[in-house]
Image (cartoon, rainbow, N blue to C red):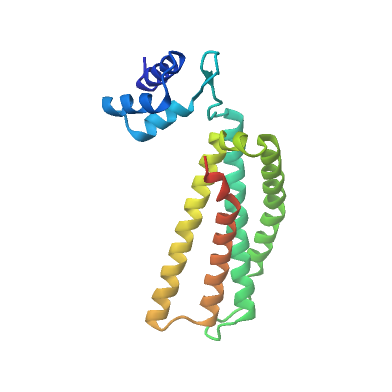
């Protein structure tokens, strides 16, 4: 039997015998269990009030949800990439560099627009469908797939923001912080903040 199952069974039997939570926690702590392990085992059961201890709903992992969230993440990455790429091209046209010669790269702009028109509706539909299917509150927090997706998304957004800040500071210290570069860094920062804000609440569990 796994250690987690032994701990869960002990808590269930102790609650069924009528012992209070403080005494159970003290016994587990004295036996060497960590605070997160004790809290996880204690919150898995609820006093039935004369009935046997009632199990609480636990986080779940659905293979179908995992697949859909993987597709959702791919769509989000592609949308963000092409929005930033298109924004960079627009900034290049709005703030031209006299040292650059030749016509603007309209092919990459058309490709980014096409990618956004293809993947943005997919992302919106999938995100709305998954949010509606999971619901809110406790049910959303029990979705391990959504929490993993939110964690990876917020982590990636934080790394992008940190890298963007390093680029701005380095350019400023080097004397190379031009309006063109500042506008591009601002665009990256806005995208990172929007993505992090959208999924920050899903980190709670």
Q: Residue at x 57, y 48 (%)?
A: 201
Q: Position of residue 91 (x, y in %)?
A: 61, 75
Q: Quadrant of residue 6?
A: top left
Q: Quadrant of residue 48?
A: top right
- Pick whichever, 129 or 70, lies toward us: 129
Q: Quadrant of residue 50?
A: top right
Number of disc labels = 0
Q: Position of residue 194 (x, y in %)?
A: 59, 59
Task: Give the side of residue 176 with respect to residue 139, left or right.
Answer: left
- Pick whichever, 175 or 13, lies toward us: 13
Task: Give the side of residue 121 with respect to residue 145, left or right.
Answer: right
**Residue 151 shows up from this direction:** yes
Q: Please, which residue is most extreme toward the bottom here?
A: 98
**Residue 32 shows up from this direction:** no
Q: Position of residue 146 (x, y in %)?
A: 57, 39
Q: Position of residue 191 (x, y in %)?
A: 58, 62
161 relative to 97, above or below: above
Task: Give the side of residue 86 with respect to residue 148, left or right.
Answer: right
Q: Residue at x 41, y 74 (%)?
A: 169
Q: Quadrant of the N terminus?
A: top left
126 relative to 186, above or below: above
- Pick whichever, 32 or 24, lies toward us: 24
């Amino acid at each position: 039997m796994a250690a987690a199952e032994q701990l869960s069974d002990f808590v269930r039997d102790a609650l069924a015998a009528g012992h209070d939570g403080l005494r159970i926690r003290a016994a587990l702590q004295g036996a060497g269990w960590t605070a997160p392990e004790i809290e996880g085992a204690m919150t898995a059961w609820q006093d039935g009030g004369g009935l046997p201890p009632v199990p609480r709903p636990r986080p779940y992992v659905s293979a179908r949800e995992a697949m859909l969230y993987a597709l959702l993440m791919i769509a989000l990455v592609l949308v963000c990439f092409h929005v930033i790429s298109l924004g960079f091209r627009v900034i290049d046209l709005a703030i031209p560099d006299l040292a650059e010669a030749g016509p603007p790269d309209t092919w990459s702009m058309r490709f980014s627009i096409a990618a956004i028109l293809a993947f943005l509706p997919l992302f919106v539909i999938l995100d709305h469908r998954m949010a509606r299917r999971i619901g809110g509150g406790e049910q959303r927090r029990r979705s391990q797939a959504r929490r993993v997706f939110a964690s990876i998304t917020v982590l990636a957004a934080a790394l992008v923001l940190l890298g963007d800040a390093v680029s701005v500071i380095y350019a400023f210290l080097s004397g190379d912080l031009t309006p063109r570069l500042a506008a591009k860094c601002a665009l990256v920062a806005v995208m990172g903040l929007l993505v992090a804000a959208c999924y920050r609440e899903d980190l709670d569990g």
